[in-house]
Image: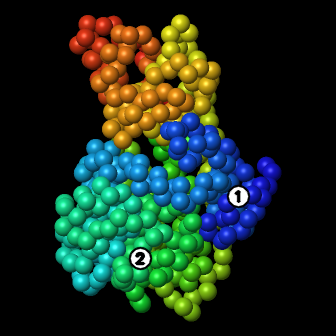
Amino acid sequence: MSLQIRQRNCPICDAHSKEVITKVDFELFKGHPMNGGYDVVQCTTCGFIYANTPVTQNELDRYYTDLSKYEDKTIGTGGGYTQNDKDRLVVTANFLNKHIINKNARVLDLGCANGGLLRELKGHGFTNLVGIDPSLECVNITKEEVGCECYQYSLFDIPESAGKFDVITLTHVLEHVLNVQQTINILDKLLAPSGVIYIECPNATYYKEVIHAPYQEFNAEHINHFTEVSFENLMGNFQYKKILTADKIFKIASDQDYHAVYGLFKKDSTYQHPLQFDNAIRSCIDEYIEQSEKIFSEIRKSIATLPKDRPAALFGVGQFAFKLLKTDIFNSSNDFKLFDNNRMNVGKEIKGVKIAHGSELINEYKIAPFSIIISSLIHEAPIRKNIEELFEKNNLKPPVIVGFSRFLPS
């Protein structure tokens, strides 16, 4: 592997020397800041693994302000509207309730989405709760449904008037943030003396354990890949001493396990943290990449068997679909169709093709037949069933439909 000295410094230790591990490529919505993909790299100083992208923080802020999926209760997480999401938030709230005795403590949930964690904390008797999120819709939902203070800000434009907080939580936020060190500096200013910070992110050590789609963890949103070691390095750099770090497992929408690393930290101006090199993470990531490539290779072979006399339609435009759109069948021609049931995606454009709602599938097929590729591996079965029933209801023989769930490890 060659060393790469350009673009983004290490988000943990700010070193500039990094080793390229793999390239991730996407075909994204028109105007999406991550179009063109990025290199996944490892810092040669501390071992942290991250996306080496030229995207700016302002571009990311605009994406999460204008294109947030989290406000949609049917697909977004963080609101506790599904049982699995609620269960995850209950576990986090129980942990915080155990470690924070004062129920009048001023608690800030940064990146609160639809306020699910705040709702659970309120149920534990916490009375001084505040949420902040870049999405105005999320803010309004949190105000109305949780009944607490909530404000629309980016992490990087929170005013001093917000005041100080005894507890700050960031659950599944830091993996999205370009300027991680600047984020901790901001938390420093927001945190009251003797306050604590709780952080939680996907645990990169366990990506290889449950693969939901090939390269799924290297996507257009997750640009930092944390472990317990990197949490301690990051917070230790700012003289935050750990109270506890650990791994947790929760269920996601597919009912599969998902690992998260979490930690509780307290400021200690006398604390000096020795930077540790994360010796374990690289072998875990290499194994994840190897498994992902095997699956993706079989998927490409499956796509290559589609009829050549008609275009293809991609059903479901999510993170794996963005990678599928870089395969040969979509690169060789713009004669394809895109369908999605997510209202946040409908009408957006990729490679000059507008995304249509799934309800338009039959009308479009009657105009010009096409094969169908189901992009979701974990939800393939119900999607396939719905499509087949839709064709039968309209007295049409279903076209060739391909999906890829059979390639996932059992």
Query: Which mark, residue 34?
Result: none
Q: Amino acid at mark 1?
A: Gln
Describe residue 194's horizontal placement relative to residue 234 as left or right. left
- Quarter of the image holding residue 192? bottom left
Name the residue: 37% across, 81% down. Answer: 161
Image location (x, y in percent) of residue 153: 39, 66
Image location (x, y in percent) of residue 187: 46, 77
Describe residue 35's horizontal placement relative to residue 198 as left or right. right
Residues 263 and 319: in front is: 319
Can you name the residue that lies furthest to the right here?
2
Image location (x, y in percent) of residue 391: 30, 13
Residues 83 and 311: in front is: 311
Comparing marks 2 and 1, which lies closer to the viewer? 2
In the picture of the structure, the residue carrying the numbered disc 2 is 159
Vertical placement of residue 329 versus 36, above or below: above
Q: Amino acid at mark 2?
A: Pro
In the picture of the structure, the residue carrying the numbered disc 1 is 7
Cα separation between marks 2 and 1: 29 Å
Vertical placement of residue 354 versus 72, above or below: above
Describe residue 107's horizontal placement relative to residue 274 as left or right. left
Name the residue: 38% across, 10% down. Answer: 367
Task: State how the image is colored.
Answer: rainbow
Asked if labels 1 and 2 touch by Cβ distance under 8 angstroms, the answer is no
Residues 258 and 329: in front is: 329
Q: Is residue 48 visible?
A: yes
- Quarter of the image holding residue 35? top right
Q: Is residue 251 visible?
A: no
- Quarter of the image holding residue 276? bottom right
Image location (x, y in percent) of residue 362: 32, 16
